[in-house]
Amino acid sequence: MDVRFTLSRTGFAMNVDLQLPDKGVTALFGPSGCGKTTFLRVVAGLERCLDSEIRVGDEIWQSGAIWRPPHQRPLGYVFQQPTLFTHLSVRQNLQYGARRVRHPLSGDEQAKVLALLGLEPLLDRAPTGLSGGEQQRVAIARALFTRPRLLLLDEPLAALDDARKHDILGYLARVRTDMNVPMLFVSHSRDEVARLADYLVLMDQGHITAHGPVTELFSRLDLALAREPDTGVVLETQVTGHDPAYGLTQLAFPGGTLLVPDGRHQDGQSVRVQIQARDVSLSLDPPGRTSILNILPVTIDTLQAESPAQVLVRLRAGDTPLLARLSRRSADALNLEPGQAAFAQVKAVAVLA
Amino acid sequence: MTPADQDLAALWLTLKLAGVTTLVLLILGTPLAWWLARSTARWKVMVDALVALPLVLPPTVLGFYLLVAMGPEGPLGQLFTALGGAPPVFSFIGLVIGSVIYSLPFVVQPLRDAFAAIGTLPLEVAATLRASPLDWFFTVAVPMARSGFLTAAVLGFAHTLGEFGVVLMIGGNIPGQTQVLSIAIYEHVEALDYGRAHLLAGGLLAASFLMLLAVYGFNRRFSTVRA
């Protein structure tokens, strides 16, 4: 997918030239007002701009004089606010888009989406009687029913409380693994990106500051991402074994294995985990008698002072980058320097999906 | 024609005039109201003011200009003659033209406000669900503005029922042809026939009140359902 456009509004200019993966979830991430929503609106054709080119798969949506209006672009769009049509029932809302496309989801596929999003009990309710989270789930299903080539999500969780957010995030993760629809997803929440995104586009004040696979960008020290309290890396792992006696699951990634308490996953399944920098400590000698479960041999890659008290260290376990946040005093005491071999002691691993 | 027949003819003519006028206004007023609700053109404010003009203008002023325009020498009269008809003064078609202009704000303003209240979001949502502009206009905008349509239709109808000055100026007072209820009442009063004036005036009062009651009742129920 290619997105190239320039746009200027009073007091705001945008300049985008990007090639994005045709598969998986791409997140647009940045502070409010950086142009994430405008980016999405341009892709959907809701915002017109000169000098632009939008290609999705083998289709040209706009380029030079070509401009397909929004209703001729095979996309789904989930807005930030609830958008169900209040003059229609939930069922009619779900069919609004499906009735207007040549190949909507079949009855079986629709039933699968309804089950995936937990919508069966809501079908006969009025949209105005639904909670914000329920309305967003209906809106996601309504978009999926049109069999979109691309699903655009503009902070669909922003208007929800934390518990609901967590719910929908779970539903979206299921859509991501089960539906095979490429998604372009706007967020300013690091947690949402860590859970859902495969590819990440960082934006600031109308410009793209960096883009790449999530696993790569989350481990870079030069980006704003590294300066947050919950900075950490995301790893794609595979289940390689279980230890039922202790209730542990073994996850392998290029560079080592991790043990996590988890009973949900099957052998061979991919599991995404997050390791926060503050949960990783370093030892130059192989740790002896310790209660830490996960100890990985690593090489020190880069050190970056964050404050007079703290240092962020980028490590490599095989090919996989990790981050560790240490006190500067410890880093000096151990005399850490790039290229050195060490052992990373991982205190906590969060299983994301 | 007996006096009772004459009153019935006036009633029928009034209902016909109000019905036709409302229909014409809904057809012409909808696109105009839509444009007023959505356009960002600078001269939109001029059109807004022109639409509101019949609210403040004395009906006789409006009627006078319409009489001149629709007469044999006026531009509208000439247009009708050129198309092979007669100038529309003192005819039903003339009354419809006058009423449409006279009741225009009562239809256009509620529609404009109802369209403006929808905002752009539902229309963008419909577009991303593959509805073309014409499609979303009829499947989203019109249903969402339904209370505005009801208000517009009833106000337009009721306001035309009570029309007097404009009709008198351009239609005169021809029983069975241009004599509407309000003029018949005037005539009864002039003839000191208070009984028949009461009958017509009371009927008009009751009918107007009931229509407004229905609109406000419906709109209130509608807004509490939505809230």
Image: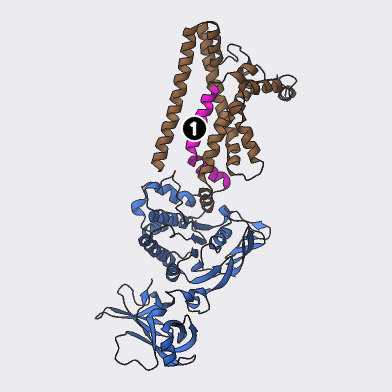
Chain colours: A blue, B brown
Question: Can residue B32 be seen?
Answer: yes
Q: Nearer the viewer, residue A125 or A185?
A: A185
Q: Which residues are magenta?
A: B132-160
As rendered, which of B36 and A140 lies closer to the eye?
Answer: B36
Answer with left or right where residue B46 lies relative to residue A251: right
* Quadrant of the snapshot with the N terminus of chain A: bottom right
Q: Residue at x 60, y 32 (%)?
A: B52
Where residue A264 appears, as percent x and y from the top left, is 31, 72
Which image quadrant: the C terminus of chain A? bottom left
Residue A107 visible to an observer of this rendering = no
Q: Position of residue A270 (x, y in %)?
A: 40, 75
Name the residue: 63% across, 21% down.
Answer: B93
| Residue pictured at 46% horizontal, 93% vertical | A340
Pointer 1: what residue?
A: B151
Parent chain of label 1: B
> Residue B7 in magenta?
no
Task: Report the side of B218 relative to A61 (left or right).
Answer: left
Q: Residue at x 59, y 56 (%)?
A: A47
Locate residue A105, reporting x and y percent. 45, 56
Where residue A136 sits: x, y (%)? 42, 56
